[in-house]
Structures are given as C-alpha cells and as structure tokens.
Image: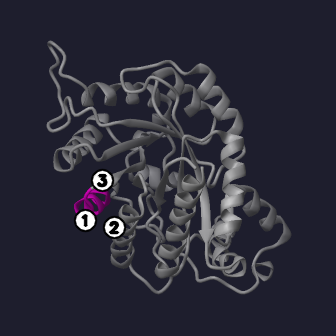
Amino acid sequence: MPPLSILDLAHITEGSTASDALRNSLDLAQHAESWGYTRYWLAEHHNMIGIASAATSIVIAHVASGTKTIRVGAGGIMLPNHAPLIIAEQFGTLDALFPGRIDLGVGRAPGTDQRTMRALRRDPTSADTFPQDVLELQALLGPLQPGQAIQAVPGTDSNVPIWILGSSLFGAQLAAMLGLPYAFASHFAPNALFQALQVYRERFQPSAQLDKPYAMVGVNVIAADTDEEAKYLFTSAQQAFTNMFRGTRGKLQPPIDDIETYWTPAEKAQASNMLACSFVGSAETVREGLEGFIEQTGADELIVASAIYDHGKRLRSYEILADVQKATSKAA
C-alpha cells in the first residue's frame, strides 16, 4: 500500500463550535503523526458554516506547531482568490517556522459560491490566469534572480513544494507541463479520475522539483470494528452530500439508522456518484477495497477524507486504516 495522508475539512459538527473543530484537527494530526501518516492537509472554503479552515494558513500553523514530523499543508489554497505574493509570503513564513514540513497545494476553484466570490473581491475571470499565477508563485518561492525587484520575505528561495490540485483534465495537463506533483479530488469528484491520471503521466515533463510523475488520489475511508458500524457512521457524509444538492449546507450531522429515509432516489444517485471512491467497513473490507483501487489507479499516495461525526470514531477510523497499511506492508 502506498503512503497515506489525511485531508481534514475541519468539520464543525452539529452541537459544536469552530473552536472544537480546530482542537479536534490538532488532536487528529498528533495521532496521525504517531500512526505514520505522511502529510496532513487542510482546505480553503469560505462562507460554509460547517467548515472551520477558511483561514487555511493560520490553521496549518496551528497544526504544525502541535506536531513534530508530519508534513502539514494546504489541500488546497484556491489561488485565484489571492495575489501570488501574499501566498508566497504566507507559506514562506510557514516554512521559516516549520522548515521542511510545509506543502502548498493550489487549485483554481473558488472554494465557495458566486456571492462570496464577490465578497472576497475576486474577479470572476481570475481563474483564467491560474497557470500564470502558479508560475509567478513558483518564481517567488524560488531563488532570487538578478534584477528581481519584488520578493517574498520570508519566501524567496524557500522552495516550498507546490502541488497542483484538480478534478478535471485541466489540472492534469498543467501539472504535467510544469513537472509538479498532482492531487486528484476523487473523494468528491471521481468522474474524470482515470483519464486525468493517464493525461498527467503521459504528458509529464521533468522539472527541478520532480523528475517523474507523482499522483496522489483522494478517497473517503470510513473504517470501524464492523461493517455495520462503518455503514452507520458513513450516513453523516451521505447526508452532507444530499444537503449540497438541496442547497442546505450546514454543520456535519450525526449518523442515522436508515439513510434511505433521508434522500430521494435522485439524490441517492447523485450523492453515490460523488462518493464512488469511498471505502466503508471493517479493516478487512477496507483493505480489500483499497487494494483493488490502488491497483486500478497506480496511485503513488492516497489522501484520505473521513467525514465522521464523532471525533473518537474518526480517530478510530484512521487508526484502523494505519493498521491496515502496516499489515499490508508487512505481508508484502
């Protein structure tokens, strides 16, 4: 099994606060470090009452300050929302505080709705310049060039690793062209996964950062001591995706006994399609599912999301997954 990492959306659950979510994120990261996970990423979302990581750089600092070895980063920063100089300064500062442990994944989606885009002072066409913004960001994080008038302080020559995030062929093509690692968001948008991986690998051009393709693939894993318990816990994620279609996003809801009473057949089809790259069950069930998925995708790394309402159950899910990886590696 390839390396495992964690994508934490810093879910605010019903009955809890953003403070609780951020405390839980640090606690999970500390456990993940002891269990051998490679990296711990947080994502930029705005105007979502159920997600506490809008100020992503600050949350990364919070998690990195409470851990020692695990890599911490953004999965991702929505670059069109920001001037590249600002992100170079923020991640240069993070690298100065936590040398060699910071990752910078960037995407071109807004991470929010149209109205909030305007509140962010974002130009609706700013995604069109995403490739140029990535190049500018690379230059700001790279060595100081002769005659360079503007530099990121801290940031210049930090060479913080940049990843391209995507859920379509656009990101795959850009990552390949720039010779950057690529992370595909199949944990919620799986439809173009195999085509994007093929494009990325076939078109990859070596760079100073990376000499061969490196693809990280997003999955949902809900692991528990029994299949039945895992399926029960999974209903929180199923409700959350159903709510997206209803336009009623909110805090993460507790699991329910029968998800069929919650969604309509059309909502079930939509949510199940988006959650197709989900592995739910006991250790053995999850192992079997992931082994087949890894064989299909050839993923160099898996990044795992787990929208579980109860923090203790979420810890247990990641612990089971870490044990599966260790047992698989030992057997191999």
Q: Tag on residue 66?
A: 1
Which amino acid, by three-letter code, is at mark 3?
Answer: Ser
Front residue of this view, candidates 319 and 178? 319
Pointer 2 and pointer 1: residues touching (CB < 8 Å)? yes
In terms of depth relative to the viewer, which is nearer, 148 or 317?
A: 317
Residue 158 image point, x, y percent: 22, 34
Assign a secondary structure to mark 3: helix
Q: Badge 3 local density, few (<14 within 10 Å), some, or many (20+)?
A: many
Q: CA distance from mark 3 to mark 1?
A: 15 Å
Instruction: Report whether 66 appears left or right of 75.
Output: left
Task: Give the overall secondary structure of the magenta segment.
Answer: helix
Distance from disc 2 to disc 3, alpha carbons, whole Å, reads 18 Å
Q: Residue flagged by tag 1: what amino acid is it?
A: Gly
Q: Residue drawn 14% across and 13% down?
A: 147
Magenta stretch bounds: 57-68
Query: From the viewer's perspective, is residue 150 above or below residue 36?
Result: above
Closest to the camera, between mark 2 and mark 3, is 2
| Residue in view at x 75 percent, y 79 percent | 259
**Residue 4 is a magenta residue:** no
In the rendered view, tell whether residue 96 sits above or below residue 203.
below
Q: In the rendered view, tell whether residue 221 sits above or below residue 236.
A: above
Q: Are marks 2 and 3 in contact (CB under 8 Å)?
A: no
Residue 192: tell me if it is visible.
no
Residue tagged by mark 2? 30
Q: For residue 149, what is the image quadrant? A: top left
What is the x, y in percent for residue 233? 63, 78
Q: Which mark is residue 57?
A: 3
Q: Residue at x 61, y 60 (%)?
A: 220
Instruction: Please name the amino acid that badge 2 sits on.
Output: Gln
